[in-house]
Structure formats: structure tokens, C-alpha cells
Image (cartoon, rainbow, N blue to C red):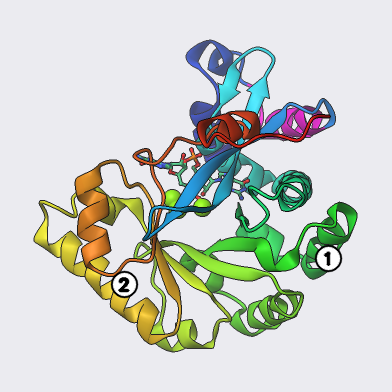
């Protein structure tokens, strides 16, 4: 316990703050206070289809900290997961993302866009998760069929039956599921077949060297074939160059996301980048 708190301290705090020896509990408290102060923001990264058209975006949370500036999720999501604050934070993300999706759905230029939202294991394990998805959809009036929840393989390892039941209940609302960071976990292929997924997302670690490392190219090609054989679409994350995009497109990858197409940005910047007129307020 002390050891893991120490590790998180190192991950989250700069050396000066570390010297102050903040505790695990204090950091959890700070995340809660951050939610109350409205310090968390969502940035959006576009997703692009094979024809080069934008089909929507992924929401990625950042912490606009009053002292530390914009903090990356890598620095607080693991901590939030370990302390349970991922539950209120996760709900804030879901609710805010649904409000953004609802706004897009009211603009003819973006009405067809989908929005992918990352979900943590602890959120999915929660008994009220299905209800929280319903509540966020109802509250925002966002189109359920354009909401996509991103899960990772590792969170599907335990309690498979109850996870499948929850996924089915959410799928029944029209919501889709994408399996994030695919290839980095240990998915059993028989389980994969039973999950109500719509999409596999090739992890960026395979995309990075897809042109130079033949084994990464084989993995990417295999994930595309596997996804298609299960009736799923396949998206690649971490696409940074046109050459990577072309190589993945030649493998029949359906969609792409990465710095080549756009960094995660605030929603207004996303609209400006794509030259989309916002309705006047
Ligand atoms: P992820 O869901 O796999 O998101 C992809 C990460 O890769 C994002 O990092 C994104 O900014 C980054 N990325 C996008 N394009 C490129 C590229 O071309 N090259 C490279 N090198 N990286 C690229 P980010 O925003 O720092 O998020 C990191 C992770 O934090 C996410 O990985 C996700 O696991 C987690 N996360 C982010 N937002 C949320 C959230 O709202 N809830 C939960 N539970 N987790 C979140
Ligand atoms: Mg993701
Ligand atoms: Mg990912
Ligand atoms: Mg990732």
C-alpha cells in the first residue's frame, strides 16, 4: 500500500511536490476538488475513414490544474483508478462527452459524427454503470447510436459473464463498443467472439513501426483480418505519417486516428480545423 502510494506520488507530483510527501488520499481528494472546481476538460481527436472523411472523434480528458497547467491523463487516470475517484471523474467524462455529441448532432455539418469515450475497468465493474450510461444519454439527448465506448482487453479478464451482460444492456440502447489498444492484452479469441463489439482499435505500438518492422506489419494485418472475420471494423491509432496511413489502408484498415490527421484539441479548435461553422449562440 505504502509502496504503491509512493509510486503514484512519483508519477503525479514533480520533485518539489514530492518533497511535500503528499499522500495517496490527499491526491484523491485533489482530484475530487478538481471535479468540483470544473478543472477537467475534454479534448477531441478526429477519426478518419478510408475515403479521408471525418467520421467523428475520441474524447480525451485533461486536467486544467490551477498550478500545474494542462495535465495529461497518463498522470492522473492510474491514480484515479487506484483511489476510486475514477467513478465520479468517469461520470463527468461520460456526461460531458454526451453533451458534446448532442451539440454535434444538432449541427448539419457534424450530425453524423460518432464520439468515442474511454471507460475504465472500475467504471464497468460498478453495478450502476448501465444506468449511468442511460442517464448521460437522457440528460444530454445525445444519439445513442453515435456513442462508442472504448474498453481495453485487460478489463475483460475478470467477471466475464457480468461484463457481457452489461455490455449487452448498453448495446441494446444503441451504443457501440470498440476494443482499445488491441493486441497489447491477452484476449482469448473465444471470448472476443462473445463480446458485443463493433470495432477493434490497433494499438499505436504496432502502428509506429508498421513500415520498418515486419512483425508489426504482420500483427496489424492480422488484427484487420481478425476484426473483419468477426464482422467488426478496424481502426488504427497513432497514425503519424501519410506512409503509415497508406500501409494500413493497403491492409484494408477501415479507419485512422493520429497526429497525421490531427492532435487532440478543444472542441472549438476541432470545428475551426475542419472549417465547420458553429451556429451563432
Ligand atoms: P488511449 O485511449 O489509447 O488514447 C490514445 C492516446 O494516444 C492519447 O493520449 C492520444 O493523445 C495519443 N495519440 C493520439 N494520436 C497519436 C499519435 O499519432 N502518436 C502518438 N504517439 N500518440 C497519439 P492521451 O490523451 O495522453 O491519453 C492517454 C490514455 O489515457 C488514453 O489512451 C486512455 O487510456 C486514458 N484516457 C484518456 N482520457 C480518458 C478518459 O476520459 N477516461 C479514461 N478512463 N481514460 C482516459
Ligand atoms: Mg482510447
Ligand atoms: Mg488506444
Ligand atoms: Mg493507448
Left or right, residue 262 beside residue 143: left
Q: Residues within 10 Å of mark 1 (few under 14, many from 20)?
A: some
Residue at x 62%, y 62% (from the top left corner): 149
The reply, left or right, for residue 37 in relation to residue 68 is right
Front residue of this view, candidates 243 and 220: 243
Q: Nearer the viewer, residue 28 or 170?
A: 170
- Determine the residue positioned at 74% across, 27% down: 30
Tell me which segment is drawn in magenta: 22-35
Nearer-the-camera pick, 10 or 276: 276
Which quarter of the figure has residue 18? top right
Callout 2: SS: helix
Residue visible at 45% across and 77% down in the picture: 232
Horizontally, is 263 left or right of 31 in the view? Answer: left
Q: Quadrant of the N terminus?
A: top right
Q: Is residue 216 magenta?
A: no
Label 2 neighbourhood size at 10 Å, few (<14), some (14-19), many (20+)? many
The spot of residue 211 in percent (x, y) is: 14, 52
Label 2 to label 1: alpha-carbon separation:
31 Å
Write down the residue under mark 1. Answer: 134
* x 65%, y 42%: residue: 80
Residue 224 visible (yes or no): yes
- Above or below, comparing residue 192 to residue 242 in the picture: below
Label of residue 243 in the image: none
Task: Judge: label 1 CB < 8 Å from ligand 1.
Answer: no
Q: Which residue is mark 2?
A: 223
Q: Main secondary structure of the magenta part?
A: helix
The secondary element bearing badge 1 is classed as: helix
Amino acid at each position: 500500500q505504502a509502496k504503491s502510494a509512493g509510486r503514484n506520488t512519483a508519477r503525479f507530483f514533480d520533485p518539489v511536490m514530492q518533497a511535500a510527501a503528499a499522500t495517496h488520499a490527499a491526491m484523491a481528494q485533489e482530484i475530487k476538488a478538481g471535479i468540483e472546481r470544473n478543472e477537467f476538460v475534454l479534448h477531441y481527436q478526429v477519426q478518419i475513414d478510408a475515403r479521408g472523411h471525418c467520421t467523428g472523434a475520441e474524447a480525451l480528458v485533461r486536467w486544467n490544474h490551477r498550478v500545474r497547467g494542462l495535465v495529461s491523463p497518463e498522470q492522473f487516470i492510474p491514480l484515479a483508478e487506484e483511489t476510486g475517484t475514477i467513478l465520479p471523474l468517469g461520470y463527468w467524462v461520460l456526461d460531458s462527452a454526451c453533451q458534446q455529441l448532442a451539440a454535434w448532432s444538432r449541427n448539419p455539418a457534424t450530425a453524423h459524427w460518432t464520439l468515442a469515450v474511454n471507460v475504465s475497468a472500475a467504471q464497468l465493474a460498478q453495478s450502476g454503470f448501465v444506468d449511468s450510461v442511460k442517464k448521460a444519454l437522457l440528460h444530454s439527448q445525445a444519439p445513442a447510436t453515435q456513442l462508442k465506448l472504448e474498453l481495453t482487453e485487460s478489463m475483460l479478464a475478470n467477471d466475464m459473464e457480468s461484463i457481457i451482460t452489461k455490455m449487452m444492456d448498453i448495446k441494446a440502447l444503441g451504443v457501440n463498443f470498440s476494443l482499445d489498444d488491441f493486441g497489447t492484452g491477452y484476449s482469448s479469441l473465444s471470448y472476443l467472439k462473445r463480446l458485443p463489439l463493433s470495432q477493434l482499435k490497433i494499438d499505436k505500438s504496432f502502428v509506429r513501426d508498421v513500415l520498418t518492422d515486419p512483425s508489426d506489419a504482420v500483427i496489424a494485418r492480422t488484427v484487420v483480418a481478425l476484426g473483419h472475420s468477426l464482422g467488426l471494423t478496424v481502426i488504427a491509432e497513432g497514425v503519424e505519417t501519410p506512409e503509415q496511413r497508406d500501409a494500413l489502408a493497403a491492409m484494408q484498415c477501415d479507419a485512422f486516428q493520429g497526429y497525421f490527421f490531427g492532435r487532440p484539441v478543444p472542441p472549438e479548435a476541432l470545428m475551426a480545423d475542419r472549417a465547420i461553422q458553429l451556429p451563432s449562440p
